Amino acid sequence: MAFLQSMPKSETIKLREKHVGSACQLFFRSSPLKIVRGIAQFMYDETGERYLDCINNVAHVGHCHPHVVEAGRNQMSLISTNNRYLHDELVILAKRLVKTMPESLSVCFFVNSGSEANDLALRLARVHTNKKDMITLDHAYHGHLTSMIDLSPYKLNLPGGPEKPEWVHVAPVPDVYRGKYTYPRDSQSEEELGNLYAREVGEICKKVKEAKGGVCAFIAESLQSCGGQIIPPDGYLKKVYEYVREANGVCIADEVQVGFGRSGTHMWAFQTQDVVPDIVTMGKPMGNGHPVAAVITTPEIAKSFADTGVEYFNTYGGNPVSCAIANAVLDVIEEERLMERAARVGNHLLSRCESLKHKHRLVGDVRGRGLFVGVELVTDKESRIPATAEAKHVVNRMREERILISRDGPDSNVLKFKPPMVFTTQDADRLVDTLDRVLSELEENTKSVQMKLEVLVSPIREDVGSGDLQLKSSIQQYVKAV
Amino acid sequence: MAFLQSMPKSETIKLREKHVGSACQLFFRSSPLKIVRGIAQFMYDETGERYLDCINNVAHVGHCHPHVVEAGRNQMSLISTNNRYLHDELVILAKRLVKTMPESLSVCFFVNSGSEANDLALRLARVHTNKKDMITLDHAYHGHLTSMIDLSPYKLNLPGGPEKPEWVHVAPVPDVYRGKYTYPRDSQSEEELGNLYAREVGEICKKVKEAKGGVCAFIAESLQSCGGQIIPPDGYLKKVYEYVREANGVCIADEVQVGFGRSGTHMWAFQTQDVVPDIVTMGKPMGNGHPVAAVITTPEIAKSFADTGVEYFNTYGGNPVSCAIANAVLDVIEEERLMERAARVGNHLLSRCESLKHKHRLVGDVRGRGLFVGVELVTDKESRIPATAEAKHVVNRMREERILISRDGPDSNVLKFKPPMVFTTQDADRLVDTLDRVLSELEENTKSVQMKLEVLVSPIREDVGSGDLQLKSSIQQYVKAV
C-alpha cells in the first residue's frame, strides 16, 4: 500500500497539526519523537536512533514481544467477535485472572481501556450501594471519561478543568514527603502517618454517612502514579477500608498503572497493603499495548448489577483477540518470571537512586516498589520546594542521552521510572549513571547566571512548541543577551 | 500453549457462568453458540457448522479479512505505543477520514470504542457551548458508560435503569410507522412528518433556551439502530439542526453503527439527510473488530477543548496498530467498492423483503437503506400491535436454519439485518427465502392452540436460560399438556 510508506517527519508533524486535536499533546513538543520500531525495552526513531524506554508501563512484557504478537496474529486470523458468543479465550482469561486474586474476587467484566474499567467500577458501586458520594485522593487520575474526570483532581485542579461535583470528596494523598502529614515533621512512625492520612478519609465517611446514610465508594490507585509515584505508608489502606465499610461503601482498587506484578512482590499492588478490595480495575499492561482492560469484583456486586435487568454490552470487550493477547501477556509474565525480575531490578534501581540522594542537592526524595520508582527534585532539601524547571531540563537532557523518562506530580517535579518489566540491572545502571551525570552538570552549570536562565526558560520554550518560531527565537536571543 | 486448546462447550459455559458477570448476556441464552472461526459473511461453531451472519456490522469488510489481519500483524510486530509520539499511520488515517467528511469537519481524536467516542463528543460540546442540557431521541442507545446511559432512553426506560437526569431531554424518535406521528394517520407527506418530529426538538430547544440561555447539544444516530432500524423522514435532521443551532447548541451525529458506507449511497448516514454536523462519532466497523473509534469535529470546537489547557490523553487511542488496521479497513472499502455493493445488495434485500410484506400478515413494515434493513412484525396490520413473541420465535428458528439475525426496537419486534458489507445477492435471497418459509410455517402453525402457546412460551424459556432446568422442564410439560 502506498499509504504505508513512511513520510518525512516534517510532513507527519504538519498533518498532525492540521488533523489531530491539539489537546492531544506530544511528548517533547518543540521537537517530538517519531517512533517507528520497538523491541523489548528499546524504541527506535525513523533514523534508527535507539532509546532506552524507562516509562512505558503499557509495553509491560517488552515492546513487540514475539509470543504476544503471535497470539494476536493467530486469533485475528481465526475469529474476533463479541462476547454474546461463547469463546474459550475469554473464559480462560477470566479463570487465570481470578486465580491471582483474593478468593472473594471471582467475577470479571472485560472492557477496552482503564477508563472504561473505572467507569464500570463506578456503575457497579452505584448499583450495589444505591449511594452516590465518592471519595477520591488529591492529585488522582482515573481516566479521560466524563465520569472519571469528576473523580480526578489531577484534572479538576487545573485552571481550565471542570468544577468538582458536590458528591465527590477529596482526601489528601498519603504523600509522606510533601503531603499534609510528612516524615519526620508530623511523625517518625510510618504507621502513625498512615493513621493520620486514613483518619482524613474517616472524617469524610462520618460526615457523608450522617448526611446521606452512607458513601458509595472509595477509589484509589494502590500506588498513586500521576500524583508523583506515591507509596502509601504501611497500614494506610487497611484503615481506610475499615472507615469506608463502616459507612456502607465499597472499596475500589485502581490497578490500571501498577498491576500485573510491577510492584515486584505481589501481582497486584493492593496486596502490598494487605487489603481485599470489593472491585479491582486493570488495564494498560494487560494487552502489552492492545486495547484491553477488565474489572474484577465479588459475586454479590456482580449480582446486584445483573439484578437491575439492564444488560451490560461492550462491543469489543472480551473479544477473542483481546483475550488471546491478554492470555499471552500472562504467559510471558509467568514464563519469564517478570515479577521476580521487577523485584530484583527494582531493588537495584532504588538503591542506586538512593545514592543519588546523598550526592545531589537537587534530589529530595527517592521512593518506589519494584519497577515503579520516583525521584523527587527540590531546590532546597529543607523547605522541599519543588524543582519543576530543573525536572523538565533533566527529562530533556536524558532524551539527548537517548533515555526516555518523564515527570509527574502536582508540581511536575518527580522523575518517573516505570519501564517495561524486561528492564535489566545494566539498564538501571545506565539510567542512574546518566542521571547522575546530568544532575552534576545541572548543579554545576546553574552556578552561572546564563545557565540558570536557560534552565528557567527551557520549559517555556518547550511549551511554546514547534508552532511559534518567532517567540522561540526571541527567547533564544533573550537568553544569549543575558 | 496448553491454554489455547479448545475445551468442551459445557466447560466453557460452566467457566463463563462462574467467572463472567451475568449482566453480560449471551445470544440464544438457553443454547448459546460457541463461535471459533469467521470468514467473510460466515461464522463457524466448534462442530464446523456454518452460519450466515446477517447482524455483525462490526465485521464490516468481512470476518478476518486477510488484508486487515496482515496490516494488524505487521504493525504489531513493529511498534505499538501511545500518540505522544509521532506516527505516520495516525496522521494518514486522520487525513483519509477527514477527506470523507464535509470540509468543516477536519480535526480528529482517536479512542477505543464508540462509547468513548460519544463520551468525548459530550465533553467537547460541553466545553465549547459552556452549557449542560442535552437532547436525545427516545429509545436511543449511545454507549455503556455512565455518561452515555444518561443519554440512552434504551437503558433509562428499563424498569431497573437509572433515573434520567434533569438536564437530559428526550424527543420522540422519528418513527413514521409506530411513533408519535405516523404515516398515513398524521400525514401522507414525508416532509410534513419530518417537520412534525423536528418541531418536537424545536419545542425543547425553545424551553431550554428560555430557562438556561441555550442547549449544549443534540445527539442522534443518523439512522437509529437499537430503536428498531428507524429511517428518519427526509428533511428531519435539517430542521432539527436549525432549531438546535438557534438555541446555541451543537449537533452530534452518532455514526458508530451506521457509518463507513453502510447506507450504500453515502460514506456517512448523516449525508443522506443533507446536513453537516458539528461533531461526528464513529466506531464499530472502523477496525473490523479491533477496538478503535474516533471523533471528528471542527477546528473551532477542537480549539475550545485545547484552550482549557486540560490535556486529552487516551492511552491506546490512535496507537499505530489500531490506526494501521483502520487504514486497512478503508483500503478494502475502497478497493472492493463495498459502498456500491451495499447499495446494490441492500436494494435487492429491501425489495425482496417488501414482497414479504404483501404475503405475510405478520410483516407490518419494511424499511432500510443499503445494508441496514428492518422488518417490523405485528400481530395486526391495522392496529400495528408488536408481535414480540413471534419475532423471538423467528430469530430462534432462523438460527436453526443456520442464519443469524437479531431483533430490536422498544418492543423487540423488529428483525434487524446489518450484515458484513461483503454480503451477496445470493445471501440476501437465502435470508429472505428462509424468512419467508419460517413466517409461513409460523402463520400456519399458530392456527393451532398448542403452537400459539409454544410461540408465547418460547421467549420465557429463552429468558430462563440454561441455568434453571427445572423451570424449563415444567414449561415443556405445560406446553405438551395443552
Image (cartoon, coloured by chain):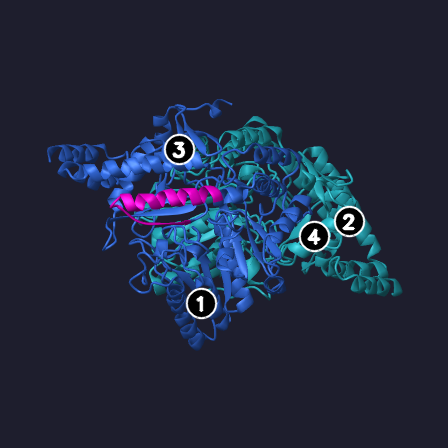
Chain colours: A blue, B cyan
Q: Position of residue A273 (x, y in %)?
A: 48, 59
Estimate the spatial distance between the alpha carbons at disc 1 and disc 3, rounded to whole Å. 40 Å
Q: Are marks 3 and 4 on the same chain?
A: yes
Relative to B54, A385 lies left or right: left
Q: Are marks 3 and 4 in contact (CB under 8 Å)?
A: no
Q: Position of residue A382 (x, y in %)?
A: 23, 55
Q: What residue is at 47 percent from the left and 75 percent from the top? A: A213
Estimate the spatial distance between the alpha carbons at disc 1 and disc 2, rounded to whole Å. 48 Å
Mark 2 vs mark 3: give the one in front.
Answer: 3
- Residue B277 image-quadrant placement: top left
Q: Which residue is mark 4?
A: B15
> Where residue A133 is drawn, which disc sits there?
1
Q: Which residue is mark 3?
A: B86
- Residue B276 image-quadrant placement: top left
- Report in which chain the residue with disc 4 lies: B
- Report in which chain the residue with disc 3 lies: B
* Residue range corresponding to the magenta coloring: A344-368
For the residue pair B394 and B231, the one nearer the viewer reads as B394
Q: Secondary structure at mark 1?
A: loop
Q: Secondary structure at mark 3?
A: loop
- Report in which chain the residue with disc 2 lies: B
